[in-house]
Amino acid sequence: QYLEATRTELAVPVNDLLDRASQRSDKMHSLSTLLTQEMDSHFPPYGRMQMPRPADCHTSALQTPNDKEQALQVSESDLMSLARSLLQAWVDPLAVLSTSAITLPHPSKSSISSKIQELQEHSKSLADGLDILSGKMGPSAQAISFLPYTGGTDLGQDRVTILNKFNFLLSCLRRDSHKIDSFLKVLRCRAAKLQPELC
């Protein structure tokens, strides 16, 4: 059954696959944004002051375009490789967020938990789709930079530390999901042969 699904996917035009991938990445980014807002609704102000900087995110070592203009200068295969590397880098931290959300000291923990599970599903589905797409684009699109998550599975013992680390991971996820979404939208735009100013 999986092989049949794969054959079907391989027959789908690249433009259509990119459309689907963009819809998934858009959903991932909107979910991570909603999660950040939900956390902020009940986040102690003194905790915010202790938040690590974005440069401390485990994916910050990956050199990526900072905005759409820069992304438009990057080759299609490199953009695909960057999107896949970022997605791969979030498999473990998403599992940590999912496990931690169950006992999170936050009044909306059940809502947060279900959104994170949804994010995991979208992430897995998007990764599978990008595997197929990268196969159509050649070896450099299939290259993945490994960005190991070394934060461990334990977010701490006291309430403020747990909320701090959880919120920090979410802010990194939101930043990276925005990048993935932007890269895929540029790829979709190029595949549709649109002028750069329309992307």
Image: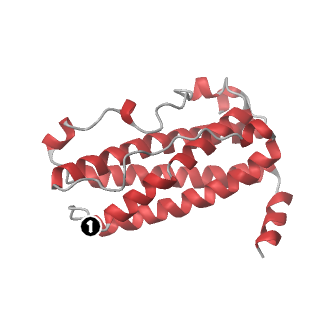
* Amino acid at dot 1: Thr
Tell me where residue 196 sits by quadrant.
top right
Residue 5 position, x and y percent, is 78, 69
Residue 58 position, x and y percent, is 43, 39
Seen from the viewer's position, the closer of residues 167 and 40 is 167
The N terminus lies in quadrant: bottom right
Q: How many marks?
A: 1
Helix, strand or loop under label 1? loop
Q: Residue at x 39, y 30 (%)?
A: 55
Q: Residues within 10 Å of mark 1 (few under 14, many from 20)?
A: few
- Give above or below for 108 relative to 24: below
Q: Residue at x 65, y 41 (%)?
A: 144
Left or right of residue 64, residue 142 in this image:
right
Q: Residue at x 29, y 35 (%)?
A: 52
Seen from the viewer's position, the closer of residues 196 and 155 is 155
Q: Residue at x 53, y 32 (%)?
A: 62
Residue 192 is at least partly visible in this image: no
The C terminus lies in quadrant: top right
Residue 170 position, x and y percent, is 37, 48
Seen from the viewer's position, the closer of residues 199 and 182 is 182
- Give above or below for 60 relative to 86: above
Residue 120 is at least partly visible in this image: yes
Coloration mode: secondary structure
Instruction: Provide the residue designation for mark 1.
Output: 103
Residue 136 position, x and y percent, is 82, 47
- Give above or below for 10 relative to 65: below
Tell me where residue 74 sits by quadrant.
top right
